[in-house]
Amino acid sequence: MPGIRLWDVATSKEKPALDTDQIKKKQRSNTLWLFTPDGKYIVTSNIGQIIFWELATGALRLELATGLSNPWQLALSADGNVLLTAEGGTALVWDVRELLKGNQS
Protein backbone atom coordinates (compact mmCIF):
# COMPACT_ATOMS: atom_id res chain seq x y z
CA MET A 1 0.00 0.00 0.00
CA PRO A 2 1.47 3.34 -0.93
CA GLY A 3 1.19 5.72 1.95
CA ILE A 4 2.33 8.68 3.94
CA ARG A 5 4.58 7.36 6.69
CA LEU A 6 4.43 8.91 10.16
CA TRP A 7 6.50 8.45 13.31
CA ASP A 8 5.86 9.22 16.95
CA VAL A 9 8.91 11.32 17.82
CA ALA A 10 8.57 10.58 21.55
CA THR A 11 8.84 6.81 21.04
CA SER A 12 10.58 6.67 17.63
CA LYS A 13 7.92 4.17 16.56
CA GLU A 14 6.21 4.25 13.21
CA LYS A 15 2.45 4.91 13.19
CA PRO A 16 0.04 3.35 10.68
CA ALA A 17 0.52 4.88 7.25
CA LEU A 18 -2.13 7.04 5.66
CA ASP A 19 -3.31 5.30 2.51
CA THR A 20 -2.50 7.68 -0.35
CA ASP A 21 -4.85 5.79 -2.68
CA GLN A 22 -7.75 6.56 -0.33
CA ILE A 23 -6.58 10.15 0.06
CA LYS A 24 -6.42 10.60 -3.73
CA LYS A 25 -10.00 9.31 -4.06
CA LYS A 26 -11.24 11.89 -1.54
CA GLN A 27 -8.93 14.80 -2.30
CA ARG A 28 -9.59 16.44 -5.64
CA SER A 29 -7.64 19.52 -4.62
CA ASN A 30 -5.31 18.79 -1.76
CA THR A 31 -4.41 22.29 -0.64
CA LEU A 32 -3.92 22.36 3.14
CA TRP A 33 -2.88 19.84 5.79
CA LEU A 34 -2.53 20.29 9.54
CA PHE A 35 -2.19 18.15 12.65
CA THR A 36 -4.62 18.50 15.53
CA PRO A 37 -2.84 19.63 18.72
CA ASP A 38 -3.52 16.27 20.41
CA GLY A 39 -1.89 14.44 17.49
CA LYS A 40 -4.97 12.27 16.85
CA TYR A 41 -5.84 13.59 13.38
CA ILE A 42 -4.56 15.20 10.23
CA VAL A 43 -7.09 17.69 8.87
CA THR A 44 -7.10 18.37 5.12
CA SER A 45 -9.00 20.83 2.98
CA ASN A 46 -10.58 19.88 -0.31
CA ILE A 47 -13.04 21.37 -2.79
CA GLY A 48 -16.11 22.04 -0.65
CA GLN A 49 -15.02 19.94 2.32
CA ILE A 50 -12.70 19.36 5.25
CA ILE A 51 -11.58 15.81 6.05
CA PHE A 52 -10.29 14.44 9.38
CA TRP A 53 -7.93 11.45 9.00
CA GLU A 54 -7.36 9.39 12.16
CA LEU A 55 -3.64 8.89 12.71
CA ALA A 56 -3.95 5.81 14.97
CA THR A 57 -5.58 3.82 12.17
CA GLY A 58 -4.96 5.88 9.02
CA ALA A 59 -8.73 5.87 8.42
CA LEU A 60 -10.99 8.64 7.25
CA ARG A 61 -12.85 9.77 10.40
CA LEU A 62 -15.01 12.71 9.28
CA GLU A 63 -15.97 14.49 6.06
CA LEU A 64 -17.32 17.98 6.66
CA ALA A 65 -19.14 19.80 3.84
CA THR A 66 -18.14 23.46 4.15
CA GLY A 67 -20.12 25.05 1.37
CA LEU A 68 -16.90 26.80 0.32
CA SER A 69 -15.65 26.03 -3.16
CA ASN A 70 -12.03 25.67 -2.03
CA PRO A 71 -11.16 26.60 1.57
CA TRP A 72 -7.78 28.35 1.46
CA GLN A 73 -7.47 29.03 5.18
CA LEU A 74 -7.59 26.30 7.77
CA ALA A 75 -6.72 26.78 11.44
CA LEU A 76 -7.32 25.03 14.76
CA SER A 77 -7.41 26.61 18.20
CA ALA A 78 -4.56 25.68 20.55
CA ASP A 79 -6.78 23.15 22.34
CA GLY A 80 -8.04 21.73 19.02
CA ASN A 81 -11.69 22.35 19.87
CA VAL A 82 -12.38 25.08 17.31
CA LEU A 83 -11.75 24.85 13.56
CA LEU A 84 -11.76 27.91 11.30
CA THR A 85 -12.19 27.57 7.54
CA ALA A 86 -12.14 30.53 5.18
CA GLU A 87 -12.30 31.49 1.55
CA GLY A 88 -12.43 35.02 0.16
CA GLY A 89 -14.68 37.06 2.43
CA THR A 90 -16.30 34.06 4.15
CA ALA A 91 -15.06 32.51 7.39
CA LEU A 92 -16.75 29.58 9.13
CA VAL A 93 -16.15 28.43 12.71
CA TRP A 94 -16.77 24.81 13.71
CA ASP A 95 -16.96 23.07 17.10
CA VAL A 96 -14.65 20.09 16.54
CA ARG A 97 -15.82 18.22 19.66
CA GLU A 98 -19.43 18.31 18.45
CA LEU A 99 -18.46 17.29 14.91
CA LEU A 100 -16.46 14.29 16.08
CA LYS A 101 -19.02 13.34 18.72
CA GLY A 102 -21.74 13.34 16.07
CA ASN A 103 -19.62 11.04 13.91
CA GLN A 104 -18.64 8.29 16.36
CA SER A 105 -17.16 5.20 14.77
Image (cartoon, rainbow, N blue to C red):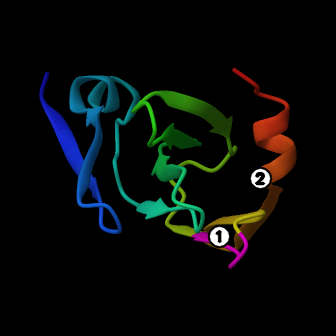
Q: CA distance from mark 1 to mark 2?
A: 9 Å
Q: Is residue 63 left or right of residue 24?
A: right
**Residue type at tag 1:** Leu
In depth, the one of 44 and 6 nearer the eye is 6
Picture layout, residue 77 above or below residue 32: below
**Residue type at tag 2:** Val
Picture layout, residue 76 above or below residue 60: below
Q: Quadrant of residue 10?
A: bottom left
Residue at the extreme left:
2
State the extent of the magenta-drawn residues as a range.
Answer: 75-79
The residue indicated by pointer 1 is 76
| Residue shown at 21% from the left, 43% from the top | 4
| Residue shown at 76% from the left, 25% from the top | 104
Picture quarter with the N terminus:
top left
Q: Quadrant of residue 57?
A: top left
The residue indicated by pointer 2 is 96
Residue 69 in percent (x, y) is at: 56, 48
Neighbor class of circle 2 (other Cα within 10 Å; few <14, some 14-19, many 20+) is: some
Residue at the extreme front:
11
N-terminal of the two: label 1 or label 2? 1
Element marked by disc 1: strand
Total number of numbered labels? 2
Picture quarter with the C terminus:
top right
| Residue shown at 58% from the left, 31% from the top | 61
Residue 78 in percent (x, y) is at: 68, 79
Picture layout, residue 9 above or below residue 51: below
